[in-house]
Image (tube, coloured by chain):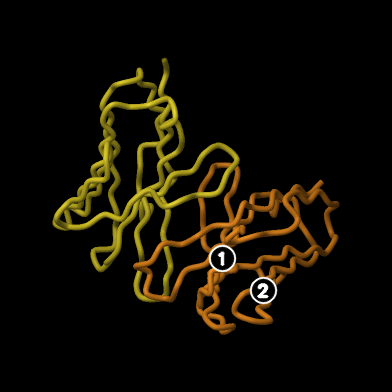
Chain colours: A yellow, B orange
Amino acid sequence: RKEVEQDPGPFNVPEGATVAFNCTYSNSASQSFFWYRQDCRKEPKLLMSVYSSGNEDGRFTAQLNRASQYISLLIRDSKLSDSATYLCVVNSGNTGKLIFGQGTTLQVKP
Amino acid sequence: DTAVSQTPKYLVTQMGNDKSIKCEQNLGHDTMYWYKQDSKKFLKIMFSYNNKELIINETVPNRFSPKSPDKAHLNLHINSLELGDSAVYFCASSQDLSGEDTQYFGPGTRLTVL
């Protein structure tokens, strides 16, 4: 079983749609959780951290369910510029080691 | 004012050659990393250094040797390149080892071994 699992997609949605990505992780001792965004042929960049209480940044909402070891990302009112691969990332221990999911590809169409 | 820079951006070479990739960060971070992203897009950590000290070595073949001359630099030397080494290699840095901070990635080095 992969340490971090995501549906690779692709998710093809029209502009303005709401889309949700899910991710599960296997290590119950994981402490920190993130969503990174990677554009085609570019480096990953932090989109947002994920907290147990849930957090929102504009059109983006992230949720963490520790009991189910499940992380989600909701994007409202999708823009063309949201087209990218979204990487679910879990920190493993205190060595700074990040475990990346395979990524979910989003394509927003006009 | 690039935060994490890598050179070269592209590297095309023959099997059996030795090559190096350089990385520098100007963020004043203590921790630096090397990641490999293969053709299936999985991004996997290879090494991490904290203040020039090796912290993580993820069962990478010993043909790969990282070197950190100071905490702002982490270079990667690869001996006897193999076809399977073809990938994009990303350098990254973070404030410290806590794993709670943002990791900032360089633009990547696309290595092709022929």
Residue drawn where x is 55% and y is 68% of the image: B33
Taking the spot 25% from the left edge, 68% from the top edge, the residue there is A29
The answer to which image quadrant residue A32 occupies is bottom left
Q: Would residue A1 be visible to someone looking at this image?
A: no
Q: Are marks 1 and 2 in contact (CB under 8 Å)?
A: yes
**Label located before the other in sequence (1 or 2):** 1
Amino acid beneath label 2: Pro
What residue sits 35% from the left and 20% below the top? Answer: A15
Instruction: Report the front residue among B93 and A65.
Output: B93
Q: Where's residue A61, x and y in %?
A: 23, 42
Q: At label 1, which amino acid type do we have?
A: Met
Q: Which residue occupies the foreground of this view, B69 or B27?
A: B27
* In this view, B105 is above or below A14: below
Q: Position of residue A7 (x, y in %)?
A: 36, 37
Residue lying farthest front?
A: B1
Name the side, left or right, on which A19 lies relative to B91.
left
Q: Which residue is mark 2?
A: B66
Report in which chain the residue with disc 1 lies: B
- Secondary element at tag 1: strand
Where does residue A62 sit, x and y in percent of width and height? Answer: 24, 46
Tell me the residue that label 1 is attached to.
B46
Looking at the image, is A106 positioned above or below residue A35?
Answer: above
Residue B48 x %, y %:
53, 72
- Which class describes the residues within 10 Å of circle 2: few (<14), some (14-19), or many (20+)? many
Instruction: Specify the quadrant of the image occupied by residue B2.
Output: bottom right
Q: Is residue B46 in sight in this rendering? A: yes
Mark 1 neighbour class, 10 Å CA radius: few under 14, some 14 to 19, many 20 or more: many
